[in-house]
Amino acid sequence: MKIPQAAEFEQIKVQVKKKIISDYGKNLFSSEAPAASYTTAVKRMEETKEAVTLLAAGLAVPFMGIQHAQSDTEKIEKGFILMPHELVSYGDFLRSMPRIKTFFEKHHALAPILTGYSDSLADFTLITEKISQSIRHQRIDPEANRHLRKIVRQIDQIEADLKKVFLKFLSQGKYLQDNRMIKKNDRYTLPVRVEWQHQFKGSIIERSNKGGTVFIEPETVARLNDRLILAEAEKTAIEYQILAELTGLIAEELPLIHQGLDCLAVLDVIFAKGKFCRDINGLPLTLNQKEELILDQVKHPLLGDEAVPLDLSLGIHTRCMVITGPNAGGKTVVLKTVALVCAMAHHGLFPNHHGQSSVPFFKSLSMDIGDQQSLANALSTFSGHMANIAGILAENQRNSIVLLDEIGSGTEPNEGAALAIAIMDAIYRSGALLIATTHYGEIKQFAVDHPDFQTAAMAFDPQTLAPKYRLLVNQVGESNAFWIAEKMQIPKPIVAKAITYLSSKAYPLQKNVFAPLPEHTHLSEHPQLLTKGDQVLAGDRGQKGIFYQYADNGQAKVWIDEEMAMVAVKRIRLLIKQTELYPAGYDLDQLFIDHRTYKFNKDLSRGSKKAYKQLKKQGKQKS
């Protein structure tokens, strides 16, 4: 099953990945496909259930050193030698395997499936003990090797001899930039002021960036420096040999290590799923093969505390549902909740619900949600929807679910409704389950009349008509277009006329006679007529603005600095025509509102509770 992008399941995956410890586990989960079989889906659900049980009991799997274990293993395979800090981390990773195996054996009754994974974990005690003996505090322990111990003591003695020799030089402080010996290019030197460099016999090893200091190696310490360099080179060679030996011990066991690495990555992912389910207060749900979708007070997992629980049943008495009601009422959220719950079930994740939810194992999940307009492909919103639905119809099959938002919208209403009914009938006859949302009365009536369709509506407050985002099954919702238009400040007389026209169909058809324009108006004085959206220079100061419309007395309205200003037409000069600035069909009206109003209207259109509360508050203040 392919999960549509509109379901927003990727946002769930991002949250789960944050809880995965290892890079290998993150990559594994990123590439995890929806379950290909019912058996796999059930197994994933049971694994997560066991992880949640262990977490609820306050038990933690002793994962150690697994964060970069895969990348370190790849280094070993390519022949690289691990550094001390990498060996310490890898030792923790190897040490964790028998501990994790013991952990699951101890709690076998709580997690029998997960205990089965731990059977492939081997014991690498010989390697881990060797690493512990050889490396302490992220460095190779000198006591780990007889030759290393000898050469370290030799280095200590040479450095002690160097300090003795340097003491007599350091007493001559007036010649020195700093009263200490400094190592430059692996040789100990004196930091001498440049004007006193001739006071010392020796070699200049380096000069400071500003030239004020020269670093001189006195003749009397040159031989000691030579001995020190040779000793340190020998020490480096011995340490490299120790690191190579430890890395080689790991390389010999790579086949068994790979088994353990694969096992721990899977367990890492499973426990991350369990933590996610615990964090959203998720409860296990049932997977069925009877094409029955039952949502028992399910909360949308991405909306947090704001989510309104959803009750829904499909596939038992009826196979299709048509949800009606106005925009911003929560219809789209219902579709996305259904899609997410189905997608999560395929990955062994369960939502917050009351415990009696049951999801069918679908082979296909299809959605048509949102604005499908594409300027690049010259597709209108309606064309985009039709292209998407055509693909859905081509792949539609039994044992699938189809979710269609505002079906048939974006074109002539009668044609759109007829086309929508034909599409829904085709999907129904293919055997798929269907949930669609609509405003159209014909589609509502079709759902009422069809014996295998049920209707549902989004709940609204009967007093204020504010949305409650709750689904009411077996009801038909109203679009509430007149109420919304009035709240969006369409003049009340216009709304009243619209209500009259709806019932009487007596539309005003009288021709209006308009008086001719007076001669010598600003229109005739300015043959270059301005249109809404043109960019202009306006006023004596020549401020940039956007032309809105002509007014009386030789004036015009121009949007300047997010305010509408009246400017004399003769003071306006065209800069750029709106046709050059905006694509065809662009909504120019949004240019003439401030950002706060634009955002408020946008929030209303997408169903923001906060925006509706603000709108309701404004209504109370006006009344």
Image (tube, rainbow, N blue to C red):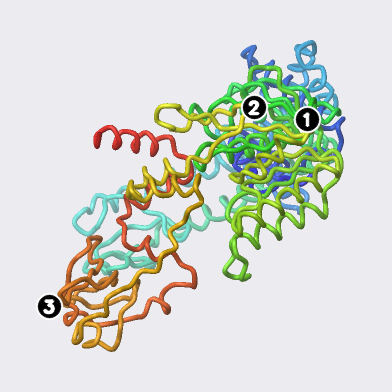
CA separation in Å, label 2 and label 3: 63 Å
Circle 1: element type:
loop
User: Which residue is labeled 3 in the image?
Assistant: 540
Q: Nearer the viewer, residue 132 or 111?
A: 111
| Tag 3 and tag 1, C-beta contact below 8 Å | no
The residue carrying pointer 2 sits among few (fewer than 14), some (14 to 19) or many (20 or more) residues within 10 Å by Cα, namely some
Q: Residue at x 40, y 58 (%)?
A: 220
User: Which residue is labeled 1 in the image?
Assistant: 318
Question: For the residue marked with disc 2, what is the amino acid?
Answer: Val
Q: Position of residue 233 (x, y in %)?
A: 59, 53
Question: For the residue marked with disc 1, what is the amino acid?
Answer: Thr
CA separation in Å, label 1 and label 2: 12 Å
Circle 3: element type:
loop
Q: Residue at x 58, y 44 (%)?
A: 439
Q: Is residue 203 above or below residue 47?
A: below
Q: Quadrant of residue 313?
A: top right
The residue carrying pointer 1 sits among few (fewer than 14), some (14 to 19) or many (20 or more) residues within 10 Å by Cα, namely some
- Classify the position of the N terminus by image quarter: top right
In the rendered structure, which disc, 3 or 1, sits on the residue that comes first in sequence?
1
Q: Nearer the viewer, residue 97 or 139?
A: 97
In the rendered structure, which disc, 1 or 2, sits on the residue that comes first in sequence?
1
Say whether residue 145 is visible. Answer: no
- Classify the position of the C terminus by image quarter: top left
Kindly give the residue lying farthest to the left in the view shown.
540
Q: Quadrant of residue 68?
A: top right
Q: Is residue 159 above or below residue 592?
A: above
Q: Quadrant of residue 317?
A: top right
Question: For the residue marked with disc 3, what is the amino acid?
Answer: Asp
Q: Position of residue 399 (x, y in %)?
A: 85, 38
Tell me if 607 is positioned left or right of 318 in this view: left
User: Which residue is labeled 2 in the image?
Assistant: 473
